[in-house]
Amino acid sequence: QVTLVESGGGLVQAGGSLRLSCEASGSIVSITSTGWYRQRPGKQRELVASTVSGGTTEYGDSVKGRVTISRRNDRNPVYLQMNSVKPEDTAVYFCHAAGLLRSFKGFDSWGQGTQVTVSS
């Protein structure tokens, strides 16, 4: 079983920056894909940024040019740097990870989410 714990959310003023972190725990051999998603009030969950082993990254259209996803290594953790935040970035941000366990079984896990509120 893999547990993902997000941190770094909170209240930030429009135009400011924030950095989210996601720590994974469990018998992980490798994380092959990981990323951040968000759910804004009244909206469906959407991609913010994702990355796979090998370095390919993908960014959501609404955040392109303002966010950067990074990883320390193939296991842990994953960061999301968001700059020039806007009130419409207010959402619950979720960490996602998928990969391989020591049992040679795959996993696909989500964190509980961290609230980000941007004030105007």
Image: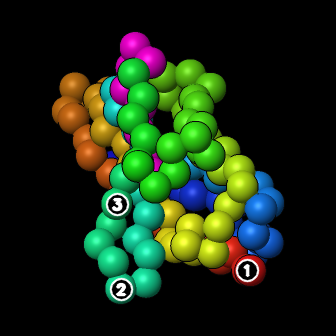
Identified by mark 3, the residue type is Glu
Q: Kindly identify the amino acid type of the residue bearing the numbered disc 2.
A: Gly
Q: Where's residue 26, x and y in %?
A: 44, 42
What secondary structure do most residues of the magenta stretch adopt? strand
Residue 52 is inside the magenta segment: yes
Up/down of 59 relative to 76, above or below:
below
Q: Position of residue 52 (x, y in %)?
A: 37, 26
Q: Residue at x 58, y 40 (%)?
A: 65
Q: Residue at position x 62%, y 26% from top?
A: 72
Q: Quadrant of residue 107?
A: top left
Residue 61 visible in rendering? yes
Cα–Cα span, label 3 and label 2: 12 Å
- Quickly name the residue at label 1: 119
Q: Amino acid at mark 1?
A: Ser
The stretch of residues the image draws in magenta is 48-55
In this view, 101 is above or below 39: above
Q: Is residue 91 left or right of residue 28?
A: right
Q: CA distance from mark 1 to mark 2?
A: 18 Å
- 75 on left or right of 50: right
Label 1 packing within 10 angstroms: few (<14), some (14-19), many (20+): some
Element carrying mark 3: strand
The residue to which callout 3 is attached is 46
Question: Are the residues at dot 1 and dot 2 in contact (C-beta closer than 8 Å)?
Answer: no
For the question of whether residue 95 can be seen, the reply is no
Say what secondary structure mark 1 lies in: strand
At 56% from the left and 22% from the top, the residue drawn is 73
